[in-house]
Image: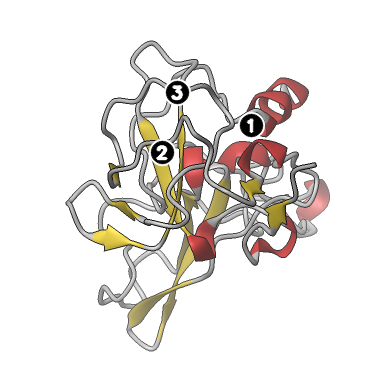
């Protein structure tokens, strides 16, 4: 199963099951505790490809965030102290919300080093198939998979706010829509943003 998820995430396809194209969307999945048998705490698993926690749990066993665990939101000792959300295009990354000093602090978007993100490689020049107008995340699209658009123009998030980043069309889903993410949440080794791919 893990191999199948990895393969699909590498192509930017997750069976058309993604519904929220914006970065930072939460996944209501059950994360593992990362606890080892015999009472010895485990280290927890790394985030899996496509934002799916591994068997040991994401980020040391942190559970998925709920509706109240958001960047900048107030928190107390009785609230969830750490949780994770998905981020990046097509939810292929993960980030944490951690309660520090009475406020949830958000980490950067992280990507599994084992992931194949070639589908998100940024071209040296926009593909002719990309729209010339601003793309809005979540709107319908019809270009093939693995064509990165929006780099020179940016995009609009689902609320209509302008963002600097990129988008891909989830063409393999039943109802293809644009999935977009900011430059800082674009998948590449180290999460630093993709370098342009030189064309011959």
Q: Residue 9 carries which label?
A: 1
Outermost residue, left side: 159
Q: Is residue 200 above or below residue 146?
A: below
Sequence-first disc among 2 and 1: 1
The residue carrying mark 3 is 143
* Camera-nearest residue between 82 and 112: 112
Outermost residue, top side: 174
Instruction: Report the Cα–Cα distance between label 1 and label 3.
Output: 18 Å
Taking the spot 66% from the left edge, 57% from the top edge, the residue there is 194
State the SS at label 2.
strand
Taking the spot 45% from the left edge, 18% from the top edge, the residue there is 16
Q: In this view, does 40 lie to the left or right of 154?
A: right
Q: In this view, does 64 lie to the left or right of 132?
A: right
Q: In this view, does 68 lie to the left or right of 169?
A: left
Q: For residue 138, what is the image quadrant?
A: top left
* Camera-nearest residue between 49 and 121: 121
Q: In this view, does 67 lie to the left or right of 159?
A: right
Q: In this view, does 97 lie above or below 45?
A: below
Taking the spot 71% from the left edge, 45% from the top edge, the residue there is 56
Q: Nearer the viewer, mark 3 or mark 2?
A: 3
Q: Where is residue 2 in the image (x, y as percent from the top left)?
A: 73, 27
Q: Position of residue 42 (x, y in %)?
A: 77, 56
The residue carrying mark 2 is 179
Sequence-first disc among 3 and 2: 3
């Amino acid at each position: 199963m893990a191999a199948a998820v990895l393969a699909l995430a590498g192509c930017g396809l997750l069976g058309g099951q993604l519904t929220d194209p914006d970065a930072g969307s939460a996944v209501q999945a059950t994360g593992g505790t990362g606890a080892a048998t015999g009472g010895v705490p485990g280290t927890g698993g790394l985030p899996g490809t496509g934002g799916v926690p591994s068997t040991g749990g994401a980020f040391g066993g942190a559970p998925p965030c709920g509706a109240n665990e958001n960047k900048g939101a107030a928190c107390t000792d009785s609230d969830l102290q750490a949780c994770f959300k998905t981020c990046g295009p097509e939810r292929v990354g993960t980030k944490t919300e951690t309660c520090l000093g009475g406020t949830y602090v958000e980490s950067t978007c992280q990507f599994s080093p084992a992931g194949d993100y070639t589908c998100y490689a940024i071209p040296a020049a926009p593909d002719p198939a990309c729209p010339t107008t601003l793309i809005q995340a979540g709107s319908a699209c019809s270009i093939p998979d693995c064509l990165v658009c929006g780099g020179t123009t940016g995009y609009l998030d689902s609320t209509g706010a302008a963002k600097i980043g990129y988008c891909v069309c989830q063409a393999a889903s039943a109802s293809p829509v644009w999935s977009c993410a900011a430059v800082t949440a674009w998948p590449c080794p180290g999460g630093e943003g993709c370098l342009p791919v030189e064309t011959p």
